[in-house]
């Protein structure tokens, strides 16, 4: 397919709907910035207050206009509530790879089947519609919960980028890099992940 950054791609199943992030989603997401600022403690520049949420949305939409990112709002269909956000980023259509990240969910949605359903839809779209060869993931090396979640969907650890970035306190962090490549998706990961949904 010819991926079009201006098109509204909606990915959904019985559990979740991923829809393109819009400026107007600020009102639906701001409760997380006000009530759950610790969601972003592992990384810098998180929307940990209403002002930072506005910057976060503006920057992600600017990156979309530059054809570098494609952000989504995550809607939990079982709870009938907005749950958080995720995105495709570092999109390189010529090299046939991208990364999935900037993923966060409110506390009531963590530990549910929501994340696996989101990742299934994103990976299916990346490998089967966009026909990419590699999907990458990154996390603060101290964010064990996030790393375990990525490994549980089938991600393979590639290595550690030392002193890569900062956390919310400005402390330097190492970042773990993981990935799934196309043949892994079709050989085992798709079926294994589907069975976990």
Image (spheres, rainbow, N blue to C red):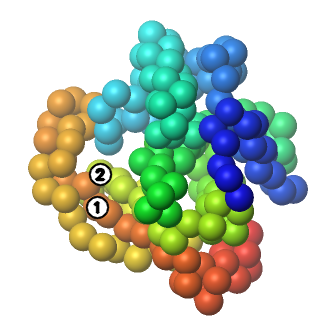
Q: Please say if 108 is above or below 28.
A: below
Which disc number belongs to residue 140? 2
- At label 1, counting other C-alpha atoms closer than 10 Å, the crowd grade (few under 14, some 14-19, many 20 or more) is many
Quadrant of the frame with the C terminus: bottom right
Q: Position of residue 2 (x, y in %)?
A: 68, 53
Q: Are marks 2 and 1 in contact (CB under 8 Å)?
A: yes
Q: Secondary structure at mark 1?
A: strand
Q: Specify whether 75 is left or right of 44.
A: right
**Does the rendering let one see residue 196?**
no
Residue at x-position 66% and y-position 78%: 190
Say which quadrant the N terminus sits in. bottom right
**In terms of image quadrants, where is residue 112?**
bottom right
Q: CA distance from mark 2 to mark 1?
A: 6 Å
Depth check: 8 or 93 in front? Answer: 93
The residue at 64%/83% (across/down) is 186
Q: Residue at the location (44% across, 16% down)?
A: 55
Q: Which residue is mark 1?
A: 176
Q: Quadrant of residue 146?
A: bottom left
Mark sitting earlier along the chain (2/1): 2
Is 137 placed above or below 85 here?
A: below
Residues packed near mark 2 inside 10 Å, few (<14), some (14 to 19) or many (20 plus): many
Q: Is residue 17 visible?
A: yes
Quarter of the image for residue 80 reads top right
Residue 174 drawn at (x, y percent): 19, 53
């Amino acid at each position: 397919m010819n991926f079009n950054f201006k098109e509204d791609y909606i990915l959904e199943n019985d559990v979740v709907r991923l829809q393109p992030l819009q400026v107007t989603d600020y009102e639906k997401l701001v409760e997380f910035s006000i009530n759950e600022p610790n969601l972003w403690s592992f990384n810098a520049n998180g929307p940990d207050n209403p002002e930072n949420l506005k910057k976060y949305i503006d920057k992600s939409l600017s990156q979309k206009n530059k054809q570098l990112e494609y952000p989504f709002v995550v809607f939990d269909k079982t709870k009938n509530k907005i749950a958080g956000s995720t995105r495709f980023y570092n999109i390189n259509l010529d090299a046939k790879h991208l990364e999935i990240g900037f993923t966060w969910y409110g506390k009531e949605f963590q530990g549910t089947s929501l994340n696996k359903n989101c990742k299934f839809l994103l990976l299916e779209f990346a490998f089967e519609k966009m026909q990419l060869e590699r999907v990458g993931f990154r996390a603060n090396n101290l964010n064990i919960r996030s790393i375990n979640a990525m490994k549980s969907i089938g991600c393979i650890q590639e290595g550690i980028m030392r002193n890569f970035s900062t956390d919310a306190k400005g402390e330097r962090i190492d970042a773990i890099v993981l990935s799934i490549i196309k043949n892994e998706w079709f050989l085992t990961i798709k079926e294994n992940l589907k069975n976990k949904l």
